[in-house]
Image (tube, helix red, strand yellow):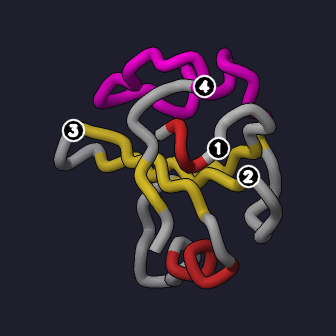
Amino acid sequence: MGQYINRTSTGVPLPAKGKAQLLIEDGARITHPEFQPNLICVVENPVLGFDAALYCETEADFIRTTHKADTRKKIYLVHPNLQPLQM
């Protein structure tokens, strides 16, 4: 299972909402939903009031984010400077 990201590459804590935007400001770029190195899936949870940012370490992690029954908005990012051990 991938790891949840709670900080930027410089150690700044991510807020409950707006994680994708802060990661973009930190150097991430939006990408297509396909497995690739340094892939992050940010899932918006408006009912619960927070976003979840998952670092997809394996293709299986990525596949879990594509379940058709999950209709929450997802933004896929690639961040060249964020490694799992920094999270």
The answer to whether the residues at label 1 and label 2 have Cβ atoms under 8 Å apart is yes
Query: Which numbered marker is on residue 35?
Result: none
- In reply to whether residue 45 is colored magenta, the answer given is no
Q: Is residue 37 above or below residue 62?
A: above
Q: Which residue is mark 2?
A: 38
For the residues marked 3 and 2, what is the alpha-carbon distance in whole angstroms?
26 Å
Q: Tell me: 17 left or right of 59.
A: left
Q: Residue at x 20, y 48 (%)?
A: 47
Q: Secondary structure at mark 4?
A: loop
The x and y percentages for residue 35 are 77, 70
Q: Which residue is mark 4?
A: 9
The x and y percentages for residue 20 are 55, 33
- Please name which of the two marks, 3 or 2, marks the residue nearer to the observer: 2
Q: Earlier in the sequence, mark 4 or mark 3?
A: 4
* Stretch in magenta: 9-29
Q: Secondary structure at mark 1?
A: loop
